[in-house]
Amino acid sequence: MNTLVVVLGPTGVGKSDISIQIAKHFQTEIISADSRQFFKEISIGTAVPDKKDLEEIPHHFIQNKSIHDYYNVSSFEIEALDLMEALFKKVNPLLLVGGSMLYLDTICFGIDDIPTVDAKTRKLVNDWYEENGIDALKQRLLELDPEYYSIVDLNNHKRMLHAVEVCLISGRKYSSFRTNVAKQRPFNVIKIGINLEDRKILYERINQRVVSMIKSGLVEEAREVYPYRNLNSLNTVGYKELFSYFDGTCSLDEAIDMIQRNTRKYARKQLTWFRRDSQIVWFEPHQVPEIIQCIDNKMNVK
RNA sequence: GGUGCCUUAGCUCAGUUGGUAGAGCAAUGGACUGAAAAUCCAUGUGUCCCUAGUUCGAUUCUUGGAGGCACCA
C-alpha cells in the first residue's frame, strides 16, 4: 500500500524547509494542507515557500485559488484525494505538509457528508442572527435539532449557525449527518510532528518572521486586498491587524505587535490540537536525518 | 534647590472610609465535522518601593528615605 507522510507542526517551526529536504530524499511531491496558502493574492503573510523551492519540488494546493472563491475543507478533501490517487501512480511516499489542523485531519480521517450551504441561506441565517441575538439562536437550534443542542458549545454562535443552516437547507437534523466514523483511506499514514521543545525559541522565530514579512512588503500586499476585507479568506492573521491600521484604529507598530501576538496564539492552538493525536512522532527541526530514518523504518514494516 | 503628583501581577492601571487585593492585555490549559490562521471556553499570577511610627491589625494614615514625572527657580 502507498504511504502518505504527513509533516505537521506549529506555524513558524520550519515545516516548509524540512519537507523540501524530505521530498528531495524520496524524490516526491508535496501537497500543502494550509488553509491560507491556497490564495494567490496573499503570499507574504501566509509564508508560502519561495520560488526556488517551488520550482525544485512540485507543490500542490499553493496559490491555486482566489480570495474571492468560496472554498472549504470538504472541497479540499475531494480535490486532494483525487490528486493523490493520480500522484501515487508515479511517486511513493507522498508528502502532506501544513499546519491547518482540520484540513490535515480531514485528509487522514475524512469528514462527514454534510450538505454545502449556499450563499443565500448563509446570508439569511446570518442576518437573522445579527438581528435576534444568541439566545434566539439557541432557541431555534433547540427546536430544529435538540440532540445537537445538547452537545454543542452554546456560546459558540458559528457552530450553532452552521447547524441551523444545514437543518434549513436539508430539512433534516444537523446531528443526523454526523457519524463520528473515520473513513478508510487507500494509503498508510505516517505522521511526523515538528516542534521546538523550548517554546521561547519558537516565539522568537515567529516574532522575527513577522518582522521579515513586513520588510518583504506585507503592508503593501495587505493594502491591495484591503477593499475585500470582509471576505472570509482575509479573516487571517497578518492581514486583519493591518486592516485596523489602515482604518486608523491603531499604529503600524501596534498592528505588528498584534500580528506577532496572534501568530503566537495560533501556534499554541495548533499544539493543543496536535497533542491529542497519539499517532504523531515528534522531532526537533534539526533532526531531518532521523525523520527520514523513521519514515524508512515505518514504510518497511508496512 | 522648591512645590505638586506617582510607585500595586510580566505590562497598563483600578482599589482597599485601616481587616494582606482585581480588571484588561500578556502567559498557560482546553473544545473543535463545509467560515478552522475561523469561532468559543477555562485558569493563575503579588515583600501592594523601602524605613520607622500610630494601631489589636498598615498596602491604605503619619515621619524619613529611594526612584520616576511635571511645574517653578
Image (cartoon, rainbow, N blue to C red):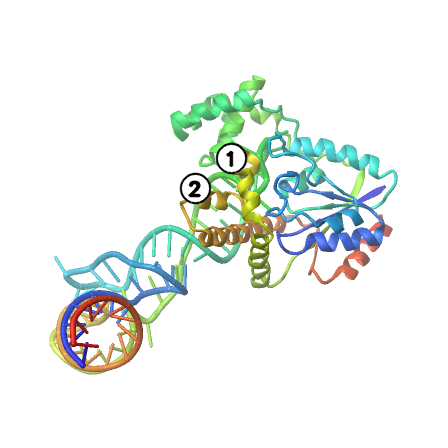
| Chain ID, mark 2 | A
User: For this view, does A65 lie left or right of residue B41?
Assistant: right
Decide: is B38 above or below B68.
above
Amino acid of disc 1: Pro
- Using a 10 Å C-alpha cutoff, classify the residue at mark 1 as few (fewer than 14 neighbours), some (14 to 19) or many (20 or more): few
Query: Residue drawn at (57%, 27%), measured in percent from left and top?
Result: A175
Residue A62's image quarter?
top right
Decide: is A89 above or below A205.
above
User: For this view, does B65 lie left or right of residue A61?
Assistant: left
Task: Measure how far apart labels 1 and 2 are at the Cα level.
Answer: 11 Å
Of A258 and A225, the residue lying toward us:
A225
Q: Could you say which disc has been placed on residue A247 in the image?
A: 2
**Residues at discs 1 and 2 in contact (Cβ within 8 Å):** no
Q: Could you say which disc has been placed on residue A227 in the image?
A: 1
Of B36 and A189, the residue lying toward us:
B36
Dot 1 lies on which element? helix
Amino acid of disc 2: Asp
